[in-house]
Image (cartoon, rainbow, N blue to C red):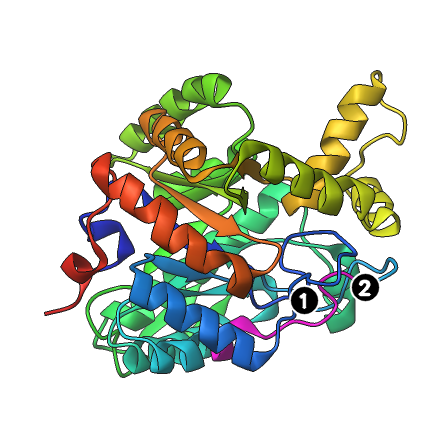
Amino acid sequence: MPRDVLSNANTLKLGIFCTNCSGGLAVTRVPERWEASWPNNVRVAQLCDDAGFDFFLPVARWKGHRGELDFEGTSWETITWATALLAATKSITVFGTVHVPLVHPVFAAKQMVTADAVGGGRFGLNIVCGWNPDEFAMFGVAQHDHDTGYEYGTEWWTIVRRLWTEDEPFDFNGRFFQLTNAIGRPKPARGRPVAINAGISPAGRNFCAKNLDCMLTRLTDINNDRVEMAKLRALGQQYGKEINVFATAHVVLRPTQREADEYYHHYAVEMADEETLDFMLAARGVPAEPASPDVLALRRRRLAGGCGSYPLVGTADAIAAELARISEAGFGGLALSFVNYLDELPAFATEVLPRLERLGLRVPARSLSPA
């Protein structure tokens, strides 16, 4: 079992999502939208490290979503990004996101163990078994069909783990990989890095429950998601373990509920990047005119607000109460996004985190500092 973010004293783990991409997760045209410069990434990582956030999670992207602003068209490669941020921080876990069909496992294992050494054991891995065909075409790589992609991912992850744990050279003769005298040195700094996957489909969830430590999934409706959480816990028990489930959310924190609602409407409706939303909905196979116009409006607002993640919109008290409900429903953590991380994170750290401490969901940041 890895020594990782999952082992600390916080009942509800909190991390920051997608600062490595221009725009973050907000599909908006507001002038204050996120600029993913390198200095901005370092400043946010250090702010989160000092405030006691648990992890930093990137999205691996190779091109943008077109549209008026080419949303996420500028992005940092995530393993080198993670390595540099681990060198610039002290306590926070920093993930790298790997599209496994694009990176050979022998190379990836060496690359990631280097990042892990830089961070003293704080590197984490987000495994992605498939993604946008348009991006894969840049590499001349055709995607496997959905379930085959997870079979490929299983072989890839098996090889990486063996390189990280076995002392003697080994041969590997699989469906996708044939290796001779494979060996990996050095080994990870403090045991295997924590590994997660965004498991949504049955095949994805089974892959994650069987092989990894944490599942990143959708949070849509807390009451309905309680039923899903029970299913996921049962799935983990089939493999003899308690499954950790994280979700994603976008945050609008303001002194009053009215101010929060008004800003959310402003950036996610009035100033939404409509061209990009059309492109993203078409790529997801969503009909332009669903049965209900209200359903489409809600879907577009949530997509513009944070790429379909869960909205946390309101005062510090309201957001803390909602986070408590999410924790009570069985979610172990959330990866958060903001329109502008640098502008908005300080208020979240000073207003929401202490409320979560008083609710018993988190401990003060100093309690998480390494010995």
Q: Residues within 10 Å of mark 2 (few under 14, many from 20)?
A: some
Q: Which mark is residue 50?
A: none
**Which segment did they paint magenta?**
71-81
Regarding mark 1 in the picture, which secondary structure is present there?
loop
Image spot of residue 300 (x, y percent): 76, 36
- Mark 2 residue type: Asp
Quadrant showing the C terminus:
bottom left
Residue 243 appears left or right of 254: left
> Real-space Cα distance between discs 1 and 2?
9 Å
Q: Residues within 10 Å of mark 1 (few under 14, many from 20)?
A: many
Q: In terms of image quadrants, where is residue 191?
A: bottom left
Eyeballing the image, is 204 above or below 20?
above
* Residue 366 falls inside the magenta stretch: no
User: Which residue is under mark 1?
Assistant: 22
* Residue 73 falls inside the magenta stretch: yes
Image spot of residue 238 (x, y percent): 30, 29
Q: Residue at x 72, y 38 (%)?
A: 265
